[in-house]
Amino acid sequence: MKFRTITLPYIFAPLIILILFIPQVLANPLKANYSRPSDIPFPSDNPYSVEKAALGKMLFFDPRLSKNKNMTCATCHNPSFGWEDATSTSIGAQNTHLDRHTPTIINVAWGDSFFWDGRAKTLEEQSLGPIQSNVEMNLSLPELIDRLSEVKSYQQWFTQVFGPSGITAQNIGKAIATFERTIVSGQAPFDLWIEGDEDAISSSAKRGFDLFNNKAKCSTCHTGWNFTDLQFHDVGLSGSDKGLGAITMKVENEFSFKTPSLRNISQRAPYMHDGRFKDLQGVIAHYIVGGVKRESLSPLMVPVLLNAQEMSDLAEFLQTLTGEDASVNLPILPY
């Protein structure tokens, strides 16, 4: 699939950043792996427009997308909690407790599959999934189309954005996905340090960065500026949820879940696909032990011996990945 991008308005900005960045790379070569991108990728079959993103935002926050008009996409993807929710596992229609923790939508523009088990191959497909799920928003797409078609302002918005095709399931998915792609983590203290501000993070965090990339082996899976390889791994968590294995029916995929981004991680507790760890110390302790031994366990999962100071330094580094994100203003919904 071809992608187009929204680029920075200043043509010389990348060159200036490169010139300023070179001395920092020479001082710490690992920094070169974590430079932020300058644009957001959008697929060629769903290009960005301001109007489409605005329409997607309305839909994202509109309770009419749920059968009982009591849930929105933001009910689970709450901007106050790193675009997740604060419960171990999500709560859906009629107070149904689901099996998994809500994954964040931060930086999903760079994703190539979606949900913890990767069952949606596009963000457009993903955006329609929870709406239709009988344990989540519990509204069929024909019902949704009829409901939105009764709203004159929505008719006008869809015609303006999509032309004569108007309100369709495909266009609803495209609008929501476009808005979701605009959810990008803000510049964090870590980014300032990468760009050359040596005082942006503490000495403890700098030691944590070294541990992250070397002894602790975190960067084996949490790679690049978004801190994810977008791959699926069995990291040895106990339980019966087989993740990707339930989709592919392959033993080697059992208990495998997609590597989450670590951006804004301090806002996103509890952690893991089932929200079992309430803090980062619990997550780090799990990786030190190495997880449940079984046939599908990732070969990357090996015990890592860290002392208390090293665990503290690693957690301190992870805290630097949370940035100053722009506040989210609720849209005025069409009526």
Image (cartoon, grey):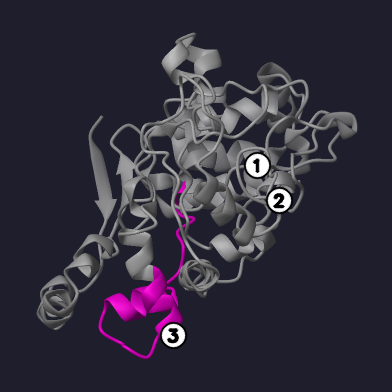
The residue identified by callout 1 is: 102
Circle 1 crowding by C-alpha within 10 Å: few under 14, some 14–19, many from 20: many
Q: Earlier in the sequence, mark 1 or mark 3?
A: 1
Residue 269, image x, y percentages? 66, 56
Q: Is residue 182 magenta?
A: yes
Residue 112, image x, y percentages? 37, 34
Q: Circle 2 sits in a helix, a strand or a loop, which is it?
A: loop
Badge number at residue 202? 3
Q: Circle 1 sits in a helix, a strand or a loop, which is it?
A: loop
Q: Is residue 101 magenta?
A: no
The residue identified by callout 2 is: 85
User: Residue 312 vs residue 11: left or right?
Assistant: right
Residue 81, image x, y percentages? 67, 59
Q: Earlier in the sequence, mark 2 or mark 1?
A: 2
Q: Amino acid at mark 2?
A: Asp
Name the image quarter holding the N terminus: top left
Circle 3 crowding by C-alpha within 10 Å: few under 14, some 14–19, many from 20: some
Query: Residue at point 47% right, 61% down?
Result: 306
